[in-house]
Amino acid sequence: MDLIIRQLQTMNIEYVTAVVSEGGVMVDQLFFHDPDGYMIEICNCQNLPILPLSGPASCPVAKSSTPNKNMPNCGKMCSEGKMCREVEALMMDNLVVGMMDLYF
């Protein structure tokens, strides 16, 4: 989020930040307008837990009994000692900043 804020400041784009508590989980929000006047919201919603629906209809696909070795476990450490979730958040920040360079 800090990377996006710095990019907005260098581009002299006004923005507003907010912190929302959802079920005890803190979510940072950032709001700004694109050149067409549409409001853009960026948040770290990956902090919110995913809650499955209850009952037998919660997942129509049967869970595989053999683990997929190509998919890393979210609890595993990635390179440089960072958690996969931290790396994912950094990648998303970089993607948003790259997209801002295209649109502004």
Image (cartoon, rainbow, N blue to C red):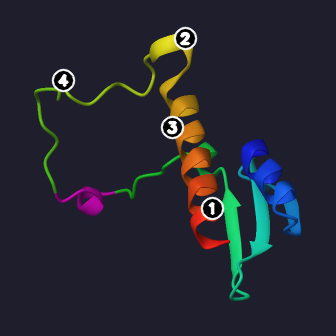
Sequence-wise, the earlier of marks 3 and 1 is 3
Q: Position of residue 63 (x, y in %)?
A: 17, 41
Q: In the rendered structure, which amino acid carries the disc numbered 3? A: Glu
Q: Which residue is mark 2?
A: 81
- The residue at which mark 3 appears reads as 88
* Residue at x 26% of width, y 31% of height: 71
Q: Earlier in the sequence, mark 2 or mark 1?
A: 2
The label on residue 78 is none
- Disc number lying in front (4 or 3): 3
For discs 2 and 1, the disc positioned in front in the rendered view: 1
Location of the C terminus (image quadrant): bottom right
* Structural distance between the alpha carbons of marks 2 and 1: 30 Å
Type of the residue with mark 1 = Asp
Q: How far apart, in angstroms, are the residues tagged by discs 4 and 3?
A: 19 Å
Is 31 in front, or is 60? 31
Is there CB contact under 8 Å for labels 2 and 4?
no
Query: Relative to residue 49, is residue 67 drawn left or right?
Result: left
Query: Residue tagged by mark 4?
Result: 69
